[in-house]
Amino acid sequence: MKKVIPPVLFLFCTLLIVGLSFLKLDNISIQLPTSYTGIILTIAGLVITIRIQKLFKRIDTEIHTFKKPRQLIQNGLFKISRNPIYLGFTISLTGVWILTANLYGFIGVLIFFLFSNFWYIPYEEKMMEKEFGNDYKLYKSKVRRWI
């Protein structure tokens, strides 16, 4: 079975949030400060994700969730979060949800968070421990999963 990679899940959840906003299940009107918050969060999350993607490319390590990592990164945003890409995607989805001003859109954010926290991240952590052993365990003990 082909495994769904996080960017595909991110896209699915984004479309889910936007799609739910068209159903008009609640009557929330978007306010200007809220829209600015949504825009800022969406952009900030994407910037985080793109910066990490560029870092992976620059140091020539694997970014694909289901492939073997080549390096243990502990600098930059990895000093704050062991999973800045998932954090960036979640922040962006939260921004999209706020922009749609639809309470039910939170389902998309929740789906992404749950899959990331209980499927992707545990899978990656097992691979990292297998590949980097005590170095990864020490890093894991110092840096939180999300923030």
Image (cartoon, helix red, strand yellow):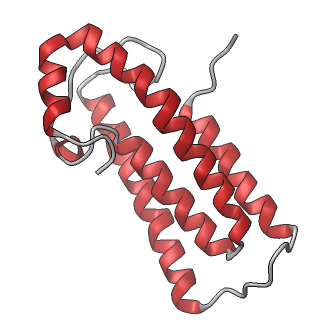
Residue 125 in the image: state x and y as whole percent.
34, 22
Q: Nearest the camera: 123 or 62?
A: 123
Q: Residue furthest right?
A: 23
- Left or right, residue 24 beside residue 121: right
- Residue 106 vertical placement versus 29 (above, below): above
Residue 140 in the image: state x and y as whole percent.
20, 30
Residue 102 in the image: state x and y as whole percent.
71, 72
Q: Nearest the camera: 99 or 108?
A: 108
Residue at x 31%, y 31% (from the top left corner): 56
Residue at x 60%, y 65% (from the top left corner): 96
- Where, quadrant-wise, is the N terminus in this rendering? top right
Q: Quadrant of residue 105?
A: bottom right
Residue at x 54%, y 63% (from the top left corner): 94
Q: Quadrant of residue 115?
A: top right
- Left or right, residue 38 beside residue 61: right
- Residue 104 vertical placement versus 9 (above, below): below
- Residue 41 vertical placement versus 83 (above, below): below
Residue 17 in the image: state x and y as whole percent.
71, 59
Q: Residue furthest bottom?
A: 32
Residue at x 46%, y 37% (from the top left corner): 117
- Residue 79 vertical placement versus 42 (above, below): above
Count up the numbered dots. 0
